[in-house]
Image: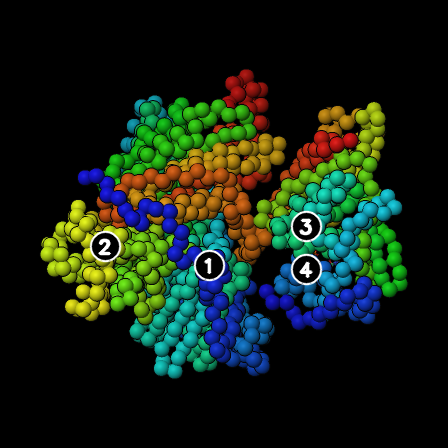
Amino acid sequence: MIPARFDYFAPSTLDEALSLLSQHLDDAKILAGGHSLIPAMKLRLAQPAMLISLGRIKSLSYIREEDGQIRIGAMTTHYEIESSARLREICPLLPECAASIGDVQVRNKGTIGGSLAHADPAADWPAAIIALGAELVATSTNGERTIHADDFFIDMFTTALEPNEILREIRVPLPTGTSQAYLKAAQPASGFAIVGVAVNLTRNADGSCQMIGVGITGVGPKAYRASAVEDALRGKMLDEQTIKDAAAHACDGVDANSDLYASAEYRRHLARVCTRRAIEAALRANRG
Amino acid sequence: MSERTFSVIGKRIPATDGPPKVTGTALYADDLRLPGMLYGKILRSPHPHARILRIDTSKAERLPGVMGVVTGKDAPARYGILPIGHDETAFCLDKVRYVGDEIAAVCAISEQIAEEALDLIEVEYEVLPAFLTPEEAMACEDPNLWIHADRKRNIEKEYHHHFGDVERGFREAIESGGAVRFDRFFQPRVTHAPMEPHACVAHWEHDGRVTLWTSTQTPHYVHRTLAEVLGIPMSSIRVIKPFVGGGFGGKSETFTHEIAACLLSKRTGRPVKFTFTREEVFYAHRGRPEQYMELKTGVTKDGRITAVEAKVIQDGGAYCSYGVVTILYAGALLAAIYDIPNIKYDGYRVLTNKPACGPMRGHGTVGIRFAFESQLDMLAEEIGMDPAELRLKNCLRPNTFTVNSLRVTSYGYDECLRRVIEASDWKNKRGKLPFGRGVGIGGSHYVSGAANSIIRSKMPHSNVSIKIDYDGGVTVYTGAAEIGQGTETIHAQIVAEELGVALDRVRVIAADTAITPVDLGSYSSRVTFMAGNAAREAARDIKRQLFRVAAELLGESPDRLVARDEKIFPQDEPQRAISYQEALMAAIEQGGTLIGKGAYTPPPEAQGGNFRGAGVGPGVAYSYSAQVAEVTVDPETGQFTVDKIWVAHDCGRAINVLNVEGQVEGSVWMGLGQAVAEEQIFEKGLTMNPGLLEYKTASAVDSPPIETIIVETIDPEGPFGAKEAGEGSLAATIPAVANAIYDAVGVRIRDLPITPEKILKALAEKRRRDKDANGHGEKPTA
Ligand SMILES: Cc1cc2nc3c(=O)[nH]c(=O)nc-3n(C[C@H](O)[C@H](O)[C@H](O)COP(=O)(O)OP(=O)(O)OC[C@H]3O[C@@H](n4cnc5c(N)ncnc54)[C@H](O)[C@@H]3O)c2cc1C
């Protein structure tokens, strides 16, 4: 329960952090809220020789609206998102997802950027980020690039970030409505998702589905977009049977996990039920 | 006689040791820092079962900062909490018997170095086949492979009891048109998970005496074992219990780190501290065993229980610990809640290559209560009777001896049942709520102090002394261990009430073997009853001394005096009072500092029958609990919530209402944890969930609303009529929830914990069954 020895740096600018990182690519790790990394270090599952803390870089912590996007700094805590009155108005999925994470202590320290970069297969944020069609801004000493949420998660604990990159910002296209919901069946001890389903949708004037994003976490090795569910609903009238039939495709092509908390079969079942219920909840949530 | 009114008994008194706890100034073992203190760590086995061929500690010893290393040869004496179960040594000598078994300990100038040193100890093993279930263990005929060479086929102990004639009982049930059922149930291994992990500091001083501060429930038993293992007299050992952050049974015997701290302190001449990681707490374990239960029960048409036949197999892990007690409790206490004329019990305590199980809140009774109370509901359905009604029909009477010679004195189970039936609106809910919602009932009980001591000694089980000096302060010395359950407050209240002084005059000094008289410890829910009686006796001793002098001053006979509100006066003549202080000064002037003492020894009538195994089960009294749980089940996912618990607990008399409520609610939480989540899971002998992020225990935030009803039966022998409140309510929660789930969706879960996945599977099976039944043109079942 004692981490291996490491050096600790807490630069006050992003540039300093990036240059430190580029100099120690093999042995440095970024430290955000520390709520995934430190436990891993205590168990010696991770043994970085150097930690570069982003804690002093105030400019990484914000929620603002710009160019038709909601922009969230990577160091923004779960709690800051959960408690944002503005987000509750314009993109309720974000605070709802944040509020479902762990417990108060975890939400006070943990960050959205840390969670996304960590890519725990049972983390909540990835589902929301996929459902919202967000873009992630990665920065390095070589410059910046944006990665679409769909391309960000590669595998368990593996993302598209290069070793020299820091996730700087999350950009969420400003939703045109509030038909959103996050529904999770939580692992009872930690609160992590056994299954978590995020839904973001808009409807045409006739009530049919115009756009829908469904992100699912907890089921497989990484969070994914439930394309088959989306395809089955786009353009359709959203009646009970249609939703139910669409939700049956929640795990198409996904190899479901089996662990101490749920068998693969139960996970798949839960994913379908939660998907249907999340879509229904999103429809109810519309304040149009 | 009309009930007298009390000054501090029966009130809601906040814990007297609460302020330092909530302000963070209370010192727990891990908070202690002595000059020059070293940090210890334990090397544990990675194999469930292996012979140790060689241990080489030389590299570890050479690591800078390492001050000492000890292994089995440094303390080879065998010990164990039970005289018949001396199968442990401080460190493994020849074999390791579970993943986590202790092989060596090091101490160093920092925890980091101590941990690094563990990696440098070389151990060569010959891996042996591991027994991971009782079935595998009992099937082994090769003595070379048995976990302990002298435990044939790995059976620690088996008991076969038969009281009355169960076959006759079953016949009677059938002939009356009643029902007989046979069912199997399973309880998984669960652990106490106290908030504070085990921790201790030992200091071996140059005069050859050693002091051990340790987080323990049983300072006296630790004291004894240390003397045996360290080979020095008890008088050279001082065991001090600092603040303890919970035990629940998991700190009721001597553990390796306590011995290691003493050995290493002796070797280095410096104090040595050990604090377990959470993972190590799971290895130390001593929690509930996996328990396989077969239960056959008969009831007559009109709902009388005629016979019970139970077979219980416990997977006790690698050492005996309290195991023999656990397997006996499971059988013996079947008789102490319902009136059952015929009981047959076959109990097997089996050794396996997993951490040793031991006592845990509700010791031995919890699994079997789940089974029994579940089966009662099934029987009620078969004879078409309300399950609450069936329970009411089978209550014992106060002041009876059961078929297996347990002496039941006060008995409030029937009243507990009536109170929760009424409070929960049972009659309008059971079977009447919409599909997906339901209520269930369950009952439980527990000894209020075991009538026989584990160590088979004739000495009193509790001793308390009191000192009062010129300052007027009342100092109470007790060996009883406050572990968060509130016993210091109880001692203070009893003494204040008896002496008629203000509560804040009383200071309790507890559990320091050099200062306080012997008490057997905080287990079997014995402290309020036994130490409470001893405290009352000690206060009476003081009172006699005060009254003798006060009587002279008042020109009265001492028997006419009463003490109340800091005054002493003749009965019914408060206007003639002299103050407590005045009487005290006069008494001290005559004979010096006032010293009083009291002791408690269980009465022989309570000590049980005369057969092999009769020593376990007898309590000096029994507490009772009835509960109703209301649940909502989501039939589509199996997920469910426990919406409310009504609990009525017969604690004889609530000496401290606040404390009783706290203990009862805590029991319900623990029961809930076990009902819905807790299970220590193993794969090839390795604990898969040794942490609180994986092993879910219920906490305050998970609590449904709990309505606690206190039932007072005023026990004839309890202090002011009090019995236990800390354990008896745990077991009833589990079957109440299981029965409520049945009421809600018609499926019965027979293996704990009750998880959404199990409910969903059972629902699918039920649907299939109902469909088949329909297909065959039969009526669908409910
Ligand atoms: C008790 C407990 C319960 C929890 N329950 C939940 C839950 O229910 N749902 C859930 O989703 N999560 C849960 N978590 C995880 C929690 O949300 C973490 O805070 C989160 O996963 C990681 O964020 P962090 O800021 O703490 O990152 P850290 O732990 O500091 O870092 C995590 C990883 O990301 C890297 N990293 C961090 N920031 C960046 C960046 N800006 N750019 C590049 N790499 C970066 C780090 O190097 C590290 O590898 C729980 C954690 C705990 C301890």
Give the CA distance from mark 4 to mark 1: 29 Å
* Dot 3 amino acid type: Tyr
Which callout, 2 or 3, points to the residue nearer the camera? 2
Residue B199 horizontal/vertical position (percent): 47, 65
Q: Which mark is residue A34?
A: 4
Residue B556 horizontal/vertical position (percent): 11, 54
* Dot 4 amino acid type: Gly
Ligand 1, by image quadrant, is bottom right
Q: Are marks 2 and 1 on the same chain?
A: yes
Which callout, 4 or 1, points to the residue nearer the camera? 1
> Which quadrant is home to the N terminus of chain A?
bottom right
Image height of A152 relative to B168, above or below: below
Q: Is mark 1 within 8 Å of ligand 1?
A: no
Image height of B562 relative to B430, above or below: below
Image height of B59 relative to B348, above or below: below
Say which residue label 3 marks: A79
Give the CA distance from mark 2 to mark 1: 33 Å
* Dot 2 amino acid type: Lys
Q: Are marks 4 and 2 in contact (CB under 8 Å)?
A: no
Say which residue label 2 marks: B567
Secondary structure at numbered mark 2:
strand
Can see residue B11? yes
Q: Chain of mark 2?
A: B
Say which residue label 1 marks: B21
Q: Quadrant of residue A175?
A: top right
Q: Are marks 2 and 1 in contact (CB under 8 Å)?
A: no
